[in-house]
Image (tube, rainbow, N blue to C red):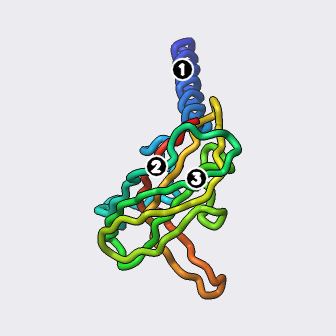
C-alpha cells in the first residue's frame, strides 16, 4: 500500500514538473494564439470582440540582410467597433526575439476613429536575423489610445494583432 502511494506521488510530481517546464518554456517563435505576443489581451466577450485588423502587403518582406536598414511599406486594414477612437500600431521585434519594440522606439502609430479603413505606413527599421532563436516579424495592433495629459503622451492597450514573418 505504501509503495503504491509512493509511486503515485512520484508520478504526480513528475507530471507537475513537466507541466511547469512547458508553461515556463521561453517563447522562441511567435504564435498568433499565444497571449504573450500581444501587448495586453482583453476579454473577447467584452472589448474588441468584433474588432478586426489585417496586414496586407508588406514590402520588402523577403531577401533581407541582417543589420541593413529598410524602408518598409506596410498596408493595414482595420475595423474598430468596440471604441469610438483607438490606434493602429506597427511594431517589430528588433530588440528581443520574443517581444515587440514599443511604438516610441521608431515604429509607427496612427490614431483612428470607429469604423473600417485601410492605412499605408512607411517605416524605417533595421532588419534583425534571429537565426535559430526565432523569426523577425512586423506586427499591426489595433489598440485603445488614452492620452495622459500629465505625461503628455498616449498609452496603448492592444485589442487584436496580426503579424507577418519577414525572411532573410
Residue 66 percent location from the top left of the image: 67, 40
Q: Are marks 1 and 3 in contact (CB under 8 Å)?
A: no
Q: CA distance from mark 1 to mark 3?
A: 43 Å
Q: Are marks 1 and 2 in contact (CB under 8 Å)?
A: no
In the orientation shown, which residue stands out farthest toward the right? Answer: 67
Q: Quadrant of residue 52?
A: bottom left
Dividing the image into 4 quarters, which one contains the C terminus? Answer: top right
In the orientation shown, which residue stands out farthest toward the bottom? Answer: 149
Q: Residue at x 46, y 70 (%)?
A: 87
Q: Which residue is mark 1?
A: 11
Q: Residue at x 52, y 19 (%)?
A: 8
Q: Are marks 2 and 3 in contact (CB under 8 Å)?
A: no
Q: Is residue 99 above or below residue 106?
A: above
Residue 127 percent location from the top left of the image: 64, 46
Q: Is 147 placed left or right of 132 in the picture? A: left
Q: Secondary structure at mark 3?
A: strand
Q: Earlier in the sequence, mark 1 or mark 2?
A: 1
Residue 92, labelled with which disc?
3
Amino acid at each position: 500500500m505504501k509503495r503504491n502511494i509512493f509511486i503515485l506521488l512520484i508520478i504526480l510530481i513528475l507530471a507537475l514538473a513537466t507541466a511547469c517546464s512547458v508553461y515556463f518554456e521561453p517563447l522562441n517563435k511567435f504564435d498568433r494564439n499565444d497571449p504573450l505576443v500581444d501587448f495586453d489581451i482583453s476579454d473577447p466577450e467584452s472589448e474588441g470582440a468584433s474588432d478586426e485588423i489585417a496586414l496586407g502587403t508588406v514590402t520588402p518582406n523577403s531577401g533581407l540582410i541582417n543589420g541593413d536598414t529598410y524602408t518598409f511599406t506596410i498596408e493595414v486594414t482595420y475595423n474598430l467597433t468596440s471604441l469610438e477612437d483607438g490606434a493602429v500600431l506597427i511594431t517589430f521585434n528588433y530588440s528581443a526575439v520574443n517581444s515587440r519594440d514599443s511604438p516610441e522606439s521608431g515604429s509607427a502609430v496612427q490614431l483612428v476613429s470607429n469604423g473600417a479603413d485601410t492605412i499605408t505606413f512607411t517605416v524605417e527599421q533595421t532588419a534583425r536575423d534571429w537565426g535559430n532563436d526565432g523569426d523577425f516579424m512586423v506586427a499591426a495592433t489595433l489598440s485603445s489610445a488614452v492620452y495622459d495629459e500629465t505625461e503628455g503622451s498616449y498609452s496603448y492597450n492592444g485589442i487584436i494583432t496580426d503579424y507577418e514573418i519577414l525572411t532573410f
